[in-house]
């Protein structure tokens, strides 16, 4: 192993080619891209989206870069807003080993630079793969438990590295400038769990995307930065943001084992720690024909960490409701589905639903459950007790979403934003992304009609 881990990671990105990606990795990158675009389309319904749009519009007067499901903004504006859109309704991916939402940081700058440079779909696919792998590899070396103990929130800390990798790859940066872009990305690393329970945790992702874009564009201009940010003894990421980290994990089997395959997807708009609750409740409802009027009590068991973060959250507004296992359990039992309309203010004001969530749903800590699992026990009014335990939710790499499920999510999210014809044409181009000659064809379909 060389003494410069950052430089070696940059070399991997600089030399990565389409042929280096195993077929399963290519398809996984397509899955993650389709899912991220679905999230962005759904994100227009986010409660704070208009505020972030106003900020994005203030970042420049040009309209060269597409905002998914909207018009055009500057490179910086589109990157920031697309990053927020992907995470706005709490339905984007998560790399569970680091609790990092990855696509909101990586895909927006890649789209902006690819569109400006008229890149091919193949080049975009490779750049996204490079960004996803960079983020998760830096996360692996970061040693998340130690970083989490210090309060760091991963997307704003490690996300800028992946964003810089994706943008830098499309800009054609050599390994030296890519390494300096990582130094610039790390110099913007920030975001802590003090923001938990507020929309600012989602802004960490958007700002991470913008930080990576700025890092790559500055590196393109040969701006000087350290080429060894990760392990620098005085202020390096692993030494300052963690306990020294696990530097060997950044490069271990790089290009042979793909950490991006450990990124999970979410089928439903709700917190990561609540996804297993939804998985279990839908399975119980289907297996036992549960009806809310016949349910006497619901007991939701979460791992201690998830319980501490979620158990006491109410449903005063949409964002909190998406984090609340009690409200989510109630609405899923009532309607046997989970999408954003069920978290609208009119639904939150339903007194009968709120009474069910308050009086019949109990959330308890269960040390036997892992960090992302759930145990749901439902007692019916006739005395039956049915139980479903999940170690992982639907969408985990061990229980992945199918391409058909991801495309279904895209169609659901695009309704009311894109025409059905545009949505289907976009899905067709995404399925064969490596054959697309110019990504502007795709992005033209993703712009909302004026």
Image (tube, grey):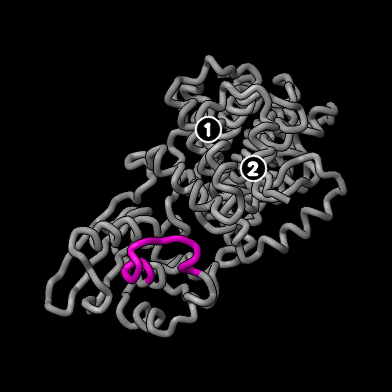
- For the question of whether residue 401 can be seen, the reply is yes
Disc 1/disc 2 C-alpha distance (Å): 12 Å
Quadrant (top left, top right, bottom left, bottom right) of the N terminus: top right
Task: Decide if residue 425 is on the left or right side of residue 62.
Answer: left
Looking at the picture, how far across and down is residue 135, in whole percent? 57, 37
**Farthest residue, direction right:** 61
Badge 2 local density, few (<14 within 10 Å), some, or many (20+)?
A: many
Looking at the picture, how far across and down is residue 210, in whole percent? 72, 45
List the residue tagged with mark 2.
Answer: 446
Q: Secondary structure at mark 1?
A: helix
Which one is in front, 197 or 38? 38
Principal SS element in the magenta part? helix
Say the numbered circle drawn on residue 428. Answer: 1
Magenta includes 340?
yes
Magenta includes 300?
no
Q: Secondary structure at mark 2?
A: helix
- For the question of whether residue 146 can be seen, the reply is no
Say the numbered circle drawn on residue 39. Answer: none
Q: Which residues are magenta?
A: 331-343
The residue depicted at 56 percent of the width and 23 percent of the height is 434
């Amino acid at each position: 192993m060389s003494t410069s881990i950052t430089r070696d990671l940059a070399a991997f990105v600089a030399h990565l080619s389409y042929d280096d990606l195993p077929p399963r990795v290519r398809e996984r990158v397509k899955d993650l891209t389709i899912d991220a675009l679905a999230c962005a389309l759904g994100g227009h319904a986010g409660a704070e989206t208009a505020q972030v749009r106003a900020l994005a519009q203030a970042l420049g007067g040009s309209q060269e870069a597409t905002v998914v499901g909207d018009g055009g903004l500057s490179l910086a504006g589109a990157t920031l807003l697309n990053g927020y859109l992907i995470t706005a309704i709490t339905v984007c991916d998560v790399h569970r080993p680091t609790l990092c939402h990855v696509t909101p940081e990586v895909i927006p700058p890649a789209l902006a630079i690819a569109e400006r440079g008229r890149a091919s779909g193949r080049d975009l696919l490779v750049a996204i793969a490079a960004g996803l792998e960079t983020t998760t590899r830096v996360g692996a070396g970061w040693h998340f438990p130690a970083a989490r103990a210090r309060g760091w929130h991963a997307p704003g800390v490690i996300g800028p590295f992946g964003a810089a990798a994706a943008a830098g790859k499309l800009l054609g940066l050599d390994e030296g400038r890519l390494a300096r872009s990582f130094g610039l990305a790390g110099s913007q690393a920030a975001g802590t769990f003090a923001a938990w329970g507020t929309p600012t945790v989602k802004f960490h992702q958007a700002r991470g995307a913008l930080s990576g874009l700025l890092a790559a564009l500055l590196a393109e201009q040969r701006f000087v930065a350290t080429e060894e940010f990760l392990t620098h003894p005085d202020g390096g990421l692993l030494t300052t943001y963690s306990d020294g980290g696990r530097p060997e994990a950044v490069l271990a089997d790089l290009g042979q084992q793909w950490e991006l395959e450990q990124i999970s997807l979410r089928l439903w708009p709700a917190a990561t720690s609540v996804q297993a609750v939804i998985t279990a409740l839908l399975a119980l409802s289907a297996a036992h024909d549960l009806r809310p009027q016949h349910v006497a009590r619901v007991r939701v068991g979460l791992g201690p960490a998830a319980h501490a973060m979620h158990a006491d959250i109410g449903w005063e507004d949409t964002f909190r409701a998406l984090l609340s296992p009690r409200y989510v359990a109630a609405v899923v039992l009532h309607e046997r589905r989970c999408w954003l309309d069920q978290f609208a203010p009119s639904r939150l004001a339903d007194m009968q639903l709120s009474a069910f969530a308050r009086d019949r749903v109990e959330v308890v800590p269960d040390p036997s459950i892992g960090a992302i699992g759930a145990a749901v026990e439902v007692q019916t009014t006739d005395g039956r007790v049915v139980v479903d335990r999940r170690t992982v939710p639907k969408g985990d790499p061990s229980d992945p979403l199918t391409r058909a499920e991801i495309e279904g999510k895209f169609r659901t999210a695009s309704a009311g934003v894109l025409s059905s014809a545009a949505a289907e044409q976009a899905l067709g181009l995404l399925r064969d992304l490596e054959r697309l000659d110019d990504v502007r064809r795709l992005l033209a379909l993703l712009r909302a009609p004026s």
